[in-house]
Amino acid sequence: MTDQPQRQYRLDYRPPAYLVDTVALDFDIQENNTQVTAQLAVARNVAGPAGPWRLDGRGMRLVRVAIDGADLAHDAYELTDTALWLDNLPSVFELTIVTELDPETNLSLEGLYRSGAILCTQCEATGFSRITYFPDRPDVMARFTTRIEADAARYPVLLSNGNCTQAGMAQPGRHYAIYEDPFAKPCYLFALVAGDLGVIRDTYTTASGREVALAVFTEHGNEPQCHHALDALKKAMAWDEATYDLEYDLDQFFIVAVGSFNMGAMENKGLNIFNTACVFAHPETATDGDFARVRDVVAHEYFHNYTGNRVTCRDWFQLSLKEGLTVYREHQFAIDHGSPGVTRIEQVRMIRDIQFPEDGGPRAHPVRPDSYIEMNNFYTITVYEKGAELIRMIAQMAGREAFTDAVKHYLHKHDGQAVTIEDFVVAMEETTGLDLAQFRHWYSHAGTPRVAISQQHENNTLTLTLSQSTPATPGQPNKPVFDIPISLAVFDTAGSQQVPPQLVRLNHARKKIVYKDVPEPAVVSALRGLSAPVKLTQDTTERDLVCLMAHDSDPVSRWDAAQSLYMTHLLACVDAIRADHALPGLGDGLSQAITRLLADWPADRALLAEMLTLPSTIQIGEAFERIDVAAIDGARRAVRQQIGSRFEEELTALATAHAPRSTYVFDQDAAGRRAVFALALGYLAETGVEGIEAWCRTVYDEADNMTDRMAALGALQYCPGATRDRLLGDFARRFANEPLVMDKWLRLQVSAPDIDAVAQARALLQDPAFDFTNPNRLRALLGGLVRGNAPAFHRADGAGYALLVDEILRIDAFNPQMAAALAGLIAPWQRYDARYGQGMRAGLSRLDGAELSDNTREIVASGLA
Ligand code: 0A1
Ligand code: ZN
């Protein structure tokens, strides 16, 4: 029987009909076949509906079903291609299910699959139902015992969740291991790994003195790249104890790094499985950015042990319950381990560059969505990052200490339960005393609120008028009035504080705030640190922005003032290009601000680099009704050249002062110096200053680390010629055996502005050496083209769209999650100028006419709706 894709609705939630107390899994791993025997202790759930019981399952062979040891005849159950239905069940029974699967041919990277020499699992959201028939929903929490048996030579390492209670030899040539996880968990947190793996080990002693065995496993030879991740794990464990009194709860915590993984990493209880891209970090092969990402993803997954695992989600509509909170915790951890200002700037940029466009496009959805067809399409920047911003707003309103207490209360109250976002909000209210009734709209409504602030200043009385409105989003024509915390401060033009930073709640459509005894002129700094995920328009003058950029007490606000100054000029340049007019010059205010910045470098060099970085092309596009790719790219490049020419001397001095000198260490100060060096080099290369190629060559040749090498290669993207070709060739030879480094090379191959990037991408995709089943390779090449070289991708003849659609169709046949993510790149066609939008839409129509997975079909349909 074939099941039609069903749209699931949040409000249709019903408790499970049966609960599973314990699960004993037995994996018999043979060549091309794994037999799984599951024994479930089941009891009827009095709170659940009566009638037949649905067990989810797909893509495997059902061998046997037995109840209390007695096999069921084929007509005693109903089997469809996604479910097994059982009826007339006793109220308490033992269910035995035997299934067979072939991990070797499973390229979806869900369920049990092979990545290189490693057999591994990925069960979130519903991959467990590719392993055995089971109620694959997070509110069914069971205690798991797992026995794995496999060839001892081929799979010397056997791992699963929990603690290893037994291991030994089995039949000749085979061995086994048994793991017991004492914590009840949903099946999405199940994990299994078998392989011939290298390992690095350590221990961690918890605050109460328990010793935890730590390990990072990877294919042999990669061990030296895993130390940073292990170090990050210990930092995360210590941070969670110090910040939230949360101590690790098992005897072991293992990380396994696999090369083929659809996402970043997965928080399986006690056995996290990671994309190698989020584990490997060695100075010679990873950049500072990679080092930071590894640290933060390791922490994120570790933090899930409480926010996600001990307290989990009732259903997948509640995904942000675990993800928003865990991302927030990850953000706090990152702020405590790097430059606080720059770390927040990176978070703000992520919201503005990726979340705002999602919230303004066809896929806009609330942080707690109301319906979905394919859950895997909802692991979005909105659920993760906007979800984290909502938590951050609560933390700001409550104050850090009250918020920390509230999180402790929430975790204590719901320990061992599968709960809802509403349960979380109630727990916040119970402890902080906040009234979050109106704040709840943030969870139920999509879209980015617009806030406008205007100021009047008379007789030393400063009046601010704040107003809000939110545009409609698909399926939600009317928006409520949100409760928006707005951080404000007032300075005089010399930078002295007139009104100290304070949080104002804009909880009406319009609100006036009056400050008395504020001498004129006053400079208003608003939405400091992006205190709410909204778009702000404010009647600040250029003089105000120059002042804030120089003097604001908050580095994020200084950066934001710079962004506003750049933006005004960039928008004027886009308009000029579109009207075929001459470009406006840099302007006095902007020139003065940059002059000041380059004359007096902030001690935090990473902040200096951020302050000299123009808003992204995506960010510029957000300011327009319709995106004109070529004009926006042209304007941004032109402004970079204007700055490069006007400040050539200062940028040369900046680069010279920060040129690589000492051996690589990954710390805040050194990384900041490398960031500012790369930035200056990039400006000089884009401006084509004399001698820049030789300089890049020297940097590349002498580099002892990947960050500096990438700085040189990144800058050379603007300098076609023999030097660039030689260095890219050298890079490819030098790192031929490092797939993650070759991903950087792939991105470089398709991102230079002077090349035929679409032809280049096609050639690389057809290269027999290109592994198109690996998501990292696809992200590097196709993501590198679409996001890294927008003008080439959006070329007028539609060849970029044709290439992407060809690849989506090819990939959809084996990895729907990956294909759906790629389809998302052309779904927002209506946001683009018709020159581009029509081609993108034609691409979607071509997809629409093909046979597609539910995943990709859902994305295509949203684009065509
Ligand atoms: N829970 C993980 C993310 C994740 C989600 C789905 C996956 O497979 C489809 C894999 C990982 C996290 O937040 O890190
Ligand atoms: Zn997560």
Image (cartoon, grey):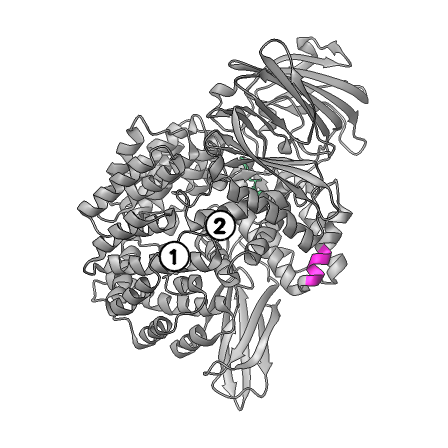
Residue 531, compared with residue 547, is above or below; it is above
- Quick check: 549 left or right of 244? left
667 left or right of 836 in image: right
Q: Residue at x 31, y 54 (%)?
A: 628
Residue 794 visible to an observer of this rendering: yes
Quarter the C terminus occupies: top left
Label 1 is placed on what type of residue? Arg
User: Looking at the image, which is closer to me, 121 or 20?
Assistant: 121
Q: Position of residue 153 (x, y in %)?
A: 53, 17
> Which residue, as the protein is rendered here, is positioned at the far front?
662
Please, is residue 744 above or below residue 27 in the view?
below
Marked residue nearer the N-terminal end (2 or 1): 2
Label number found at residue 674: 1
> In front: mark 2 or mark 1?
1
Q: Which residue in the structure is indicated by mark 2?
A: 292
Where are the magenta residues, as a range? Answer: 401-406
Give the position of the N terminus as an image quadrant.
top right
Ligand 2's quadrant is top right
Q: Amino acid at mark 2?
A: Ala
Badge 2 density bin: few <14, some 14–19, many ≥20, Cα 10 Å: many
Q: Quadrant of residue 404?
A: bottom right
